[in-house]
Amino acid sequence: MKYITFAVPCYNSQDYMRRCVDSLLAGGRDVEIILINDGSSDDTGKIADEYQLRYPDIVRAVHKPNGGHGSGVNKGLELARGLYYKVVDSDDWLDAGAYRMLLGRIRELCGGGRAEFGEGIPDLFVCNYVYDHLDEGRKRSMDYRNIFPADEMCGWNDIGRFRPSQYLIMHALMFRTDVLRASGVKLPEHTFYVDNLFSYQPLPFAERIYYMDIDLYHYYLGRDDQSVNEKVLMKRIDQQIRVTELVAKSVDLKEVKKTYPKLAAYMTRNISIMLSISSIHLLLIATSEAERKRREMWERIRDYDPGLYCRLRYSTLSGLTYLPGRIGGKLTVGGYRFARKIYQFQ
């Protein structure tokens, strides 16, 4: 049995993908690594084939026309044979010691054949991730110690309270493959920021959660062309808005609240964060067209779900990014600059 399928979407990744793949190979034959060459024009595909040739029991190279990051994630999920499914971006990597601990815990929890039937094993593993400014020699670990009990199974009604800087991103999560498939999550092609949908829509389908307080995933920051770079995000603001609206419409939060009220509260907060990011960057663009897009984004949320709109507008962080007038805009941008400095994100 393959315990984990790692999907690595690659697009023109020749300069850094080896660091990523080499870190995953430490799992040996307990894992499979699917390298998805997304129509690259450099030697990415050649490198993927090289790894498959050297490690045929572990690595699969898949070549497809360019469809964007979401397309690669979808393809990996379609082909996955592992019990769990994790996406690792081609410029990121896993910590060796934490990786060994995760695999060891999966082996323990899946003992006695329970994994075959899905009995008593986690639907979702949560681990810490690290904002790694590798080229600058600084990093910051993001943990969930105040949210989940460490090294024990829990459910959504057992979780604690998220701090303002905390939310569940793809890099922290590893879902069971069949849970992801049951959730119906499918990411749009040729669209950035789709990680937000992947780390949101399947959450209500994960009944059993297991948190390990280990710094597993290193999230590289520093390339000028990264999608989280402020200037790049402003250029792609229409895609950010699109994903925000897809997330808002992907789950019926009223239904979630009936079973998991704490999860529903978190998911509402997640939409709020995404709206805040979109609103702030539209303010940074500072054109009449950007202001129109900001207004229309909020109006579409209101038209889709008036109750959700009211919660987002008047009782969450996102409401503070939709303050009226020029002064309101300056306060919003100032708060964003301060938070970016404190939390060291891009």
Image (cartoon, rainbow, N blue to C red):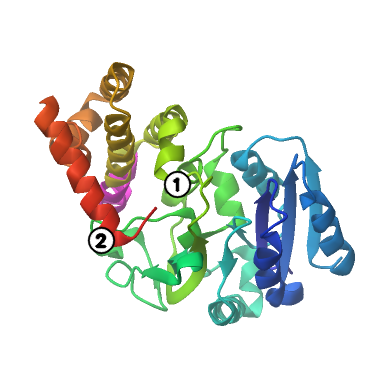
Q: Up-down: is 147 above or below 198?
A: below
Q: Is residue 141 visible?
A: yes
The residue carrying mark 2 is 342
Q: Which residue is mark 1?
A: 228
Q: Nearer the viewer, residue 325 or 60?
A: 325
Which image quadrant for residue 89? Answer: bottom right
Q: Quadrant of the N terminus?
A: bottom right
Other residues around mark 1 within 10 Å, as few (<14) / some (14–19) / many (≥20): some
- Residue at image location 44% in from the left, 28% down from the top: 242
| Residue occupying the far right of the picture | 53
Secondary structure that dominates the magenta span: helix
Amino acid carrying label 1: it is Val
Give the tally of numbered discs: 2
- Horizontal side of residue 317 vs 177, given as left or right: left
Q: Could you tell me which residue is drawn at 69 percent across and 57 percent down? A: 15
Mark 1 vs mark 2, CA separation in Å: 17 Å
- Image quarter of residue 240: top left
Residue 296 in percent (x, y) is at 30, 18
Q: Position of residue 286 (x, y in %)?
A: 28, 26
Report the side of 132 relative to 90 (left or right).
left
- Mark 1 element type: loop
Span colored in magenta: 255-267
Asked if 19 appears above or below 166 in the picture, the reply is below
